[in-house]
Amino acid sequence: MLGPVLETLIGGLLTGVLYALVALGFVLIFKASGVFNFAQGAMVLFAALSVARLSEMMPLVVAVALSVVIMIVLAYAIEFLVLRRLVNQEGIILFMATLGIAYFLEGFGETVWGSNIYKINLGIPKEPMFFFESVFPGGLLIDREEVAAAVGCAVLVAALAIFFQVTRVGRALRAVADDHQAAQSVGIPLNTIWLIVWAVSGIVAIAAGMVWGSKLGVQFSISLVALKALPVLILGGLTSIPGAIVGGLIIGAGEKLAEVLLGPLLVRWFDLAGGGIENWFAYMLALVFLLFRPQGLFGERIIERI
Amino acid sequence: MPAAADTDRNTGEAAVTPPPAGVTDSTVPAPILRVNNIEVVYSHVILVLKGVSLSVPKGGIVALLGANGAGKTTTLKAISNLLHAERGEVTKGSILFEGEEVHSRSPSDLVTRGCIQVMEGRRCFAHLTVEENLLTGAFTRKDGKAAVAADLDLVYSYFPRIKERRKALAGYTSGGEQQMTAVGRALMSRPKMILLDEPSMGLAPQIVEEIFEIVKNLNGKEGVSFLLAEQNTNMALKYASYGYILENGRVVMDGEAKSLRENEDVKEFYLGVAEGKRKSFRDVKHYKRRKRWLA
């Protein structure tokens, strides 16, 4: 019994890493500009498409580098054409704008890169690895790609954390997140800061898109990953980078475990079919959090002097 | 185009003194800031400033006085070019900082050139530590880490109180500490001029005095010019050398701080001091009429 559960747990955690990557993109933009970027999923799709199609023509490393350039150009276009025009509008208006960006990007991605299912080959062998064969019968089966993704994600997150906490620009990003106008008054240029966060979250989208793309193939459904990131955000808190990571892990592991452990129980007790728990578990968990801890596990508590 | 400097006050206020020399000594320094007859409109329709002119001499402290809604904050934001964010616009007149029009410059550009605003209500970054708050003020500087670190020490020498709290989140510090952090943050940009908006707001009189003393010190030792928007007329006129009184978006009176302090109308309307015995309604009416005429 323990072997399969452990295997599920590890598999779930590794999937959680992917959720975390998508959630991270949301958090970055929300922190710096207070915009809930609904287009994050579309950005992941667009990034994955560009990596997939470019890697058909050139080595993967070059394709990724070029995609980084593309995402930065995209960030610039979004900042210049949309955000700059909507400075100081209501949050809901900015949200609607990102909704528009999301649908535009989905379509535009197809226009530029095509609408088939494409492959990204990370060059990691597909055969899973087996661990602890002496402890458990048959050992633990672990997907190499997921391990690689987890390591990549860890590096990315560490780099971002350092960037935010230590550097001058990182500090300015946090200042803008706290109070736009005050940041502007001390000479921090908002447009530049927004450009930077959109570019960074575009780069995070590349990472997420590559991992998802190599797992599932690059196709439209990747943009729906964004919807899985929502419970992660609620769990972890919209403003917390560690929250996005831990939230992603909890959701990833939780839904897989629920499928394996809760499913059979529901079948036995209530005579239900027992499937599909993976689909709703995350959202139920998010709902519970909304009721009892709306700022999430790590969200910044609202500091208010009375 | 704005009218020439000497004929720009077309608002008919009582005081028709030429632009102030500000400091009391005989040499007349060139103004670091000149505001010529500006008009500010919010959302294209709400006329908030109806021709405000003022000037701040280099190294001076000038007070901008007036009641709520008189236009003090708007004037400061027009100068630091922060109006756009609130859909405000300078529709007439000109603002010259060191002889250059500010209109076409971005707020961060102005900070680089030495004009920075400390906004009303302190506006510290609540989730950053006090020290990080101070460091954000140095964002526009390009003169290296060592210089910034030296200025950090300088700020701490002016505000020893916040040195003790340097690692605390600014959101959890007291109002006085936040005001000091806000002024210190502005100081980190090595400004030539600070636009200080309502530093006394919500603070105990003792703390207010402490902050004004520091302002005076900064002015004397660092040569920073101040334009000080205040409702606390008494305190402001004690530290400023020159004052302007705004009412309904117009300058209704200006003069040396000392003469304003002794002016009967100012005493009556802003300092809450009335001469002699209790007045009858007739007198009150008289003052009201006079006030309207002034405006």
Image (tube, helix red, strand yellow):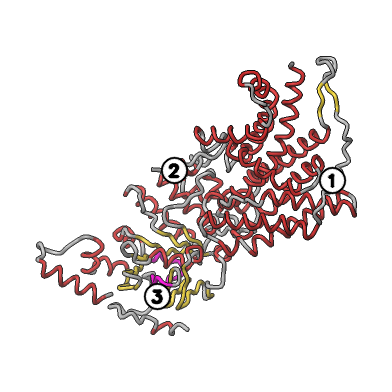
The magenta stretch spans residue B51:
yes
Percent position of residue B224, x then y = 48, 62
Q: Which residues are magenta?
A: B45-62
Residue type (three-letter) at the residue carrying disc 3: Ser
2 or 1: mark nearer the eye: 1
Query: Could you tell me which secondary element the residue under label 1 belongs to?
Result: loop
Q: State the image quarter where residue B16 is shown.
A: bottom left
Percent position of residue B271, x then y = 24, 61
What residue is rendered at 45% in x and 82% in y?
A: B2
What residue is rendered at 63% in x and 32% in y?
A: A281
**Are discs 3 and 2 located on one and the same chain?**
no
3 or 2: mark nearer the eye: 2
Query: Could you tell me which secondary element the residue under label 3 belongs to?
Result: strand
The magenta stretch spans residue B16:
no
Q: State the image quarter where residue A213 is shown.
A: top right
Front-most of residues A255 and B15: A255
Residue type (three-letter) at the residue carrying disc 1: Ile
From mark 2 to mark 1, how far is it between C-alphas?
A: 48 Å
Q: On screen, A3 above or below B220? A: above
What's the chain of the residue with tag 2? A
For label 2, the residue is A304
Numbered badge on residue A120: 1
From mark 1 to mark 3, how far is it between C-alphas?
A: 65 Å
Neighbourhood count class around disc 2 (C-alpha, 10 Å): few under 14, some 14–19, many 20 upward: few
**Are discs 1 and 3 located on one and the same chain?**
no
Q: Quadrant of the C terminus of chain B?
A: bottom left
Numbered badge on residue B53: 3
Front-most of residues A3 and B98: A3
Query: Could you tell me which secondary element the residue under label 2 belongs to?
Result: loop
Percent position of residue B151, x then y = 56, 52
From mark 3 to mark 2, how far is it between C-alphas?
A: 38 Å
